[in-house]
Amino acid sequence: MSNGAGRNDVPGAGEHATPLNPKSIFQQSPATVATTEYSEEWNTNKLHLRIASDALSAASAAGLIAPLITIVDRGIIENASGRSPLVNSIKSSFRALATCPHTFLASRPFRLISMVYFSTYLTANSIDTISSTVTPSPINHTTSGTSKFFAASAVNMSLCLYKDSQFAQMFRAPGNAASALTKSVPKASYALFGLRDSMTVFASFNLPPLLAPMLSEEVEKVMSRASLTQILAPAAMQVFTTPLHLWGLDLYNRPGVSLAGRVRQVGKNWAGSTLARMGRIIPAFGFGGVINAKVRRRLMGKLEEE
């Protein structure tokens, strides 16, 4: 279609062309009408390659961050259950990664973490691709709307709930190993984990595009504003989400404890666990988000140039 062409342009229309009769569209075959509407309203250019780029970006980010997140998540849960102090658990996991990397990378905890973040990134990328297809928009278009939040939240929350229930059972205190095989995670823990994850996803995918323009342009001399907010926003949210995480774990590890006792336990582990969760959330949704966004932007840029 040439520049300035409107919806009623027809092939061969010129200066003296007869105006299009609105009824004439109904004289076309259904297939012709469908093709016309689809080509005008949907940007399907290289769609299969865009989908592959979404998956490759998600896999690149998830593969790079999953080892550290696996180590930190295990440490937090073992510390909360009393199985092992946080620092000792993290040291032991790093030692296993360094001495037997193939065993570590094939382990169930690592596979669970990889599944969570690959699926989350892929969902967020897919929403961008769907948006650029149906709008239509440039193929490297990104969105920060509610559709991305709800879609990424649903995927991340459901997979994280499953992952956390498995981690809680795998890394329960040794004295309770037998009961861990049959004991289910309380519904209240699932609710707290779900609220925790929705807040984290919001800070990871929706806040950065909103906060980045508010920063001074001087920041660009050191780091792009988009990258900085992508790192800081989810990390800062851990101050508020860590108590939810610890409370959910304590409900599973110590059923029947009084409210005061639970508050003391959460308060006791809050500072160290918050720092640890910041340390794992920065790669998970900070660096991981930056890697995912940059790889996708580069791949989509190449597709646009071709």
Image: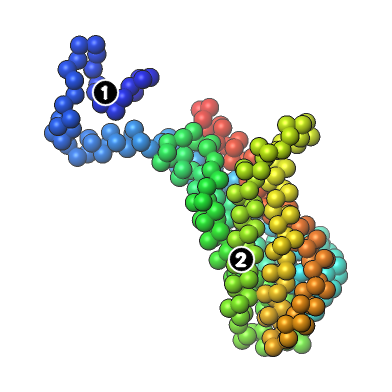
> Can residue 250 be seen in the rendering of this structure?
yes
Contact check, label 1 and label 2, Cβ < 8 Å: no
Image: 169 above or below 158: below
Residue 195's disc is 2
> Can residue 283 be seen in the rendering of this structure?
no
Foreground disc of the pair 1, 2: 2
In three-dimensional space, the C-alpha distance between marks 1 and 2, rounded to whole angstroms, equals 52 Å
Residue denoted by label 1: 9
Q: Amino acid at mark 2?
A: Leu
Q: Residue at x 73, y 86 (%)?
A: 258
Extreme top residue here? 15
Q: Is residue 85 left or right of residue 146?
A: right
Considering depth in this image, is 184 or 143 the residue closer to the camera? 143
Q: Is residue 85 left or right of residue 239?
A: right
The location of residue 270, given as percent across then percent down, is: 79, 68
Q: Residue at x 86, y 70 (%)?
A: 88
Q: Is residue 240 left or right of residue 22?
A: right
